[in-house]
Amino acid sequence: NVSLVWLRHDLRLCDNPALHDAAQQGAVVPVFVWDPDGEAPWQPGGAHRWWLHKSLQSLRSDLEAAGSRLILREGPAEQALLDCAESVGATHLHWNQRYEPTLAAQAQTVADALNAAGCTPVFHETQLLHDPEGVETTSGGPYHVYTPFWKKVTGHDLLRTDAPPLGAPDLSGTVPDAWPDSTSVHDLRLHPKHHDGTDWTGGLADTWTPGEAAAHERLQYTLNHVIADYETERDRPDHDGTSRLSPYLHHGEISPLQVWQAVTDWADANDAHEEAKPYLQELVWREFAYHMVHHYPTIPDETYRDKFKDFAWTDDAEALQRWQQGQTGYPIVDAGMRQLRETGWMHNRVRMIVGSFLTKDLLIHWYHGERWFWDHLVDGNLANNAMGWQWSAGSGADAQPFFRIFNPVSQGERHDPNGDYVRRWVPELRDLPTSDLHAPWEASTRTLRKAGITLGDTYPKPIVDHSQARDAAMAAYDEVR
Ligand code: FAD
């Protein structure tokens, strides 16, 4: 009996139900297929590809250390998997279910093709803590508001009946008589380059260590140093106060059940359920986003609230580019956008600030922000990214109302009070006194000169006047209200 295990966003050995189940049936052939067009129109972005390259290298060596292998193929996924199945006489294809609409559609194509060829598809659950079809309001149907969703899922049965999380499967007796052909990680050509051929990934490599072992190290760090003060620290982009587990969760190097269980065990051991709650609530925001995209698969592409379909977004390519490059003249916005380009990640508070700035101060459609994030985030996923953008624009299900427009100066002063975050990412402002750092245009000529800054030259003048932009946004909103 030979089973294929189709690995996708579950690049780990521990708590991997597909791998675990297949290993109990006999021989196992783990396969990863690089099939970006199978995920169209949301082909994986550049930062995702960089991470994936490293993650596959890590998974391959973990599988080899366990006595197995990782077979790598190029897509289309159904053809690659059919070919592997035929070459080893596989009777079953196991995989872990995905709820992103593009990935669910791809899996359906694969299931149909393999089924027709006599290889039985078997899918497993591990992406979420709760079944999107199983969490319903009292009148039936999905939740559209987070707080009742949180209340409902607390105390609700976890999706997986085998919780607590599974360990690594014993793969020693699962080697097939022959292995299918495999390409190398290098030959998948995942490593992204700029259009001009230069490599922009140095900052990613300096910031992150992809892979299952690193995911568990970060989880341990989170338990030791993050959870206890998470409620107050999570809004401080100048501190290391959040778990930074998002890319590991996105690539499935750790499962949400592993994180959930570790945090609840920590809370039990330390009698700290109140401290752990805000963190667990964030994991449930992730759940909520996936439940929404499962029930409303157009959310990544279309405005959720009808009235925003007629909103008068502006088409300003130059402003969009200045936002993307971190050259708006608003230090907290520029710091966030530069952190993103440099490291593939941005602090949540700053994601909200730059999201508000793009959609409300610049009146640019949230879709442009979503696409830019998609290409630059190591954690960019269709559920959280779409929800984050529609939340920022006010067009989402449980969104920040449009009329709540973040003031980038007071947000900077409140959440980066010493200016460490801005100084780190916008070094040309380093020598400004903190009192002027979040609004350099208000500094005196003398102060600017002393700090070596010429506005409009060494650092941009503000791209818009925030209070005028605010009025313009409210006028545009009045048109659709
Ligand atoms: P922590 O604060 O440590 O939270 C733990 C985990 O909870 C996160 O890893 C994540 O899985 C989940 N989580 C936390 N906040 C949220 C949230 N607001 N919504 C949904 N889940 C959350 N998150 C992504 O994972 N991928 C994205 O593509 C993404 N795009 C976003 C776009 C915008 C405009 C906004 C405002 C938010 C976006 N987020 C996204 C949500 C959030 O910013 C990140 O999950 C968080 O910053 C990741 O850092 P962390 O792991 O340290 O989070």
Image (cartoon, rainbow, N blue to C red):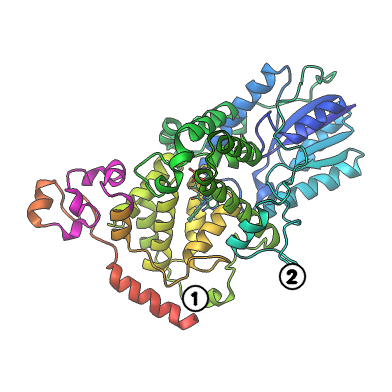
Q: Which residue is mark 2?
A: 139
Tell me: residue 23, above or below residue 155: above
Secondary-structure class at tag 1 = loop
- The percent coordinates of residue 198 (x first, y second) are 42, 37
**Left or right side of 203 for 223:** right
Q: Is residue 357 visible?
A: yes
Quarter of the image holding residue 254?
A: top right
Secondary-structure class at tag 2 = loop
Q: Which residues are magenta?
A: 415-443
Mark 2: few/some/many CA within 10 Å (<14, 14-19, 20+): few
Tag 2 or tag 1, which sits nearer the N-term?
A: 2
- The percent coordinates of residue 153 (x first, y second) are 67, 54
Q: Which residue is mark 1?
A: 311
Rendered-image quadrant of the N terminus: top right
Mark 1: few/some/many CA within 10 Å (<14, 14-19, 20+): some
- The percent coordinates of residue 297 (x first, y second) are 67, 60
